[in-house]
Image (cartoon, grey):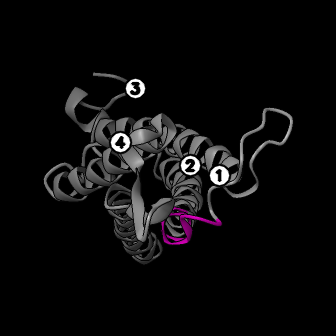
Amino acid sequence: MEDGMKADTVLLRPKTDKKCKWMNVLLLLLRMTIVLFTLIAALMMGCNKQSISKAVAIVGTTTIYQTYTTKFQQIPAFVFFVIANAMVGFYNLVVLILRRPFNNWKAFHVAVNLMDLAMFALLATGAAAATSIAELGKNGNLNARWSPICSHFGQFCIHGGLAILSSFIGALLLMILNALSVFTLYNVQ
């Protein structure tokens, strides 16, 4: 007994009213949208690859071509980006699946809220790391004598930019989800 309540009722959430049901639907839609944006970002960057051929020499009347290929695996920040987005997407998918059986457990909602904060940090750092490398690829660094590559690998840069945009939208939605989750946890207590 704790404050006149049985021990098992302390961990359970009370019955919800119409306002809380509306908020639960909003949280569900936000989480599904986060899954969509993060997995799209991971797939788009994960499939990002481009090859170009350039003439490097002319021997007699024969032109010799060199094929250059760029792919996300060559850049560690992009690999981290793909892993972070995939982890956040699959985490939210698992939460969507486990939401129904554990919906009445307050401890489940507290744990999910804490994990949501960790997932937001992971997603934001992945997107920020990819953004810094994308900026370097677009503009180069003249002081270090690094030439921009987006003039040569335009499709690679466009796909990467769209993946980063999708990830930042997912991070923004995850931040909104965190705020609303805290609000609902505070109101339920």
Q: First in sequence, mark 3 or 2: give its number.
A: 3
**Cα separation between marks 4 and 1:** 20 Å
Residue at x 37% of width, y 65% of height: 44
Q: Secondary structure at mark 1?
A: helix
Magenta-drawn segment: 151-160
- Identify the amino acid type marked 3: Asp
**Cα separation between marks 4 and 3:** 46 Å
Residue named by callout 4: 83
Relative to 132, 145 lies left or right: right
Tell me, for residue 127, which label it has, or none: 2
- Compared to residue 171, the image places residue 81 above or below, namely above
Q: First in sequence, mark 4 or 1: give its number.
A: 4
Residue named by callout 3: 3
- Identify the amino acid type marked 4: Ile
- Identify the amino acid type marked 1: Gly
Relative to 90, 98 lies left or right: left
**Cα separation between marks 2 and 1:** 15 Å
The answer to whether mark 4 and mark 3 are in CB contact below 8 A is no
- Compared to residue 124, the image places residue 118 above or below, namely above
